[in-house]
Image: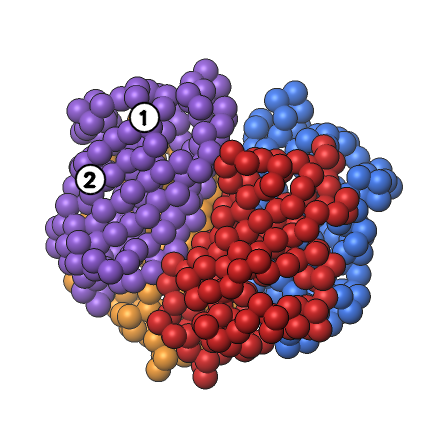
Chain colours: A blue, B red, C orange, D purple
Amino acid sequence: MKITIAEFAEIANERLPFASLMGLQLDHIGTDHVLMRAVYRDEFLRPGGTIAGPVMMGLADAAMYALVLSRIGPVELAVTTSLNINFLRKPAPGDVLARAAGLKFGKRLVIGEISLYSESNPDGLVAHATATYSIPPSSTPDS
Amino acid sequence: MKITIAEFAEIANERLPFASLMGLQLDHIGTDHVLMRAVYRDEFLRPGGTIAGPVMMGLADAAMYALVLSRIGPVELAVTTSLNINFLRKPAPGDVLARAAGLKFGKRLVIGEISLYSESNPDGLVAHATATYSIPPSSTPDS
Amino acid sequence: MKITIAEFAEIANERLPFASLMGLQLDHIGTDHVLMRAVYRDEFLRPGGTIAGPVMMGLADAAMYALVLSRIGPVELAVTTSLNINFLRKPAPGDVLARAAGLKFGKRLVIGEISLYSESNPDGLVAHATATYSIPPSSTPDS
Amino acid sequence: MKITIAEFAEIANERLPFASLMGLQLDHIGTDHVLMRAVYRDEFLRPGGTIAGPVMMGLADAAMYALVLSRIGPVELAVTTSLNINFLRKPAPGDVLARAAGLKFGKRLVIGEISLYSESNPDGLVAHATATYSIPPSSTPDS
């Protein structure tokens, strides 16, 4: 594994203010999967009293970023090329958890799947996403 | 049109704190298209010095929400069911603009297309998204 | 379960000529998952000698259709509203297999995930899709 | 432009049997957009008497392939990496038309948008897709 939780937290704190704004916290990092959490704050809510979609999208994207860095190290120029998300259940207020796992680690593209859970909805996914990251030419991930 | 810029701003300010956090501002609302802006702040940046993907996703989703409300009025329970985004060019620091337009206004689903521009990249889209909103049974949009 | 393999085969044979054209065959149907197979024929190939993307998309869509019918019975007007697919590895000539499972069975929408394998690529997925089906008002699936 | 209609037809006829099976026909090819047609046959129908989704997906993918080849020439190993489609209106029997246009022509990825029309539904899109093609390293498109 090419990056630790502490190293990712440092990147997030210093270079990814959006992650701090959203209260993102890495619970586990490994080359096969990553667990990340959006620690609840009232700003997450949308009309209807449930968690807003952009919180889930930001969390999914950041979890995927951590998964990519676990393979290639702190290569900051790895960027998302596409993301698709299906919202399944409206999460009640509470932490949102993401589990990102790889579907393919290619030389140029990493494709992964992100399952989103809510501590307030224990009975199933609240959202499901897939995302593709583009890897700079010199930073091919371990396959 | 069933909602004004001022009415949308009131919903966003009071009920959608995420939009305020992201500096979202509605420039135009109409039943055929909406223009929304994320007013630049340094927190938008990601490693590499360009605008983070979640800012663009949040903006796309909010622009689409405004388009839906332009048809059905302030029905807060209209929710995103899916969103797909392709990131095309890395936006340099600056405001990001979204233009949302409908592809279909159905009884139960509204599907739209959102084109994202950057004031710093005048030569093309920085991202392109499509999104689907689910409409509560009693709030069918004007077609 | 509201439909059997034989009943689905009858619908496919009589009403879904595309499925016959593609040699689709249902290996297993259940309310939690479906296994479907595209029996290899040379017409599946694309330049480069691997299986064409449309074969995989057609298989994914049909597997999802069978999953939906397993819940609501032979309701022919259930239709796909969206499908997203990531192509992961180029499948060498051989049968392609799809496993469709539900992410959400709602009153109006069924969302599922389809994993595609190839008998010629035993070491991983060749593609991964998510799809949404719209259910006619009177045919709510068992949840 | 690096490929003609006749050259594309030859590739399709000889190397892409799926395209022939689906009656695909290129009406226009240019580096900025492509028009392709699926000439109606009864095999296109699905239960309910409308055109099956896989026909539209195959047409969208092939139109995008032609757009890519218009830029890089007959490079057969250009492959789809992802495709997202929204089905908007059920097309009645009749030819289906696709217009593919580029959103980004990068060195490694080409991203495009495909609008699908039906000769039987003159009043709007029947489907809308976006797709990403991966370009082999030696075949960078003209930008």
For the N terminus of chain D, the image quarter is top left
Q: Is residue D59 above or below residue A43?
A: above
Q: Which image quadrant is residue D31 in? A: top left
Q: Residue at x 64, y 73 (%)?
A: B11
* Chain holding disc 1: D
On the same chain: label 2 and label 1? Answer: yes
How many numbered discs, if any?
2
| Left or right: A97, with D92 as reference point | right
Looking at the image, residue D35 sits to the left or right of residue B116; the answer is left
Label placed on residue D24: 2
- Residue D98 appears at what percent x and percent y? 27, 44
Residue B19 visible to the viewer: yes
Q: Secondary structure at mark 2?
A: strand
Which residue is found at the position 58% from the left and 76% from the top? B76
- Quadrant of residue B122 in the image? top right
Residue occupying the point 66% across, 28% down? A142
Residue D70's tag is: 1
Along the viewing direction, whichever of C139 and B47 lies nearer the viewer: B47
Residue D120 vertical placement versus B93 (above, below): below
Residue B93: assigned label: none
Choose the circle earlier in sequence order: 2 or 1. 2
Q: Report the Cα–Cα distance between label 2 and label 1.
A: 17 Å
Identify which amino acid the numbered label 1 is placed on. Ser
Q: Is residue D143 left or right of residue A16?
A: left
Residue depicted at x 23% and y 47%? D97
Q: Chain of mark 2?
A: D
Local secondary structure at mark 1: helix
Check disc 2: other Cα within 10 Å, few if <14, some if 14-19, many if 20+: many
Amino acid type at mark 2:
Leu
Which residue of the protein is positioned furthest toward the left in this rendering?
Answer: D41
x and y, in percent, of residue C132 in the image: 43, 62
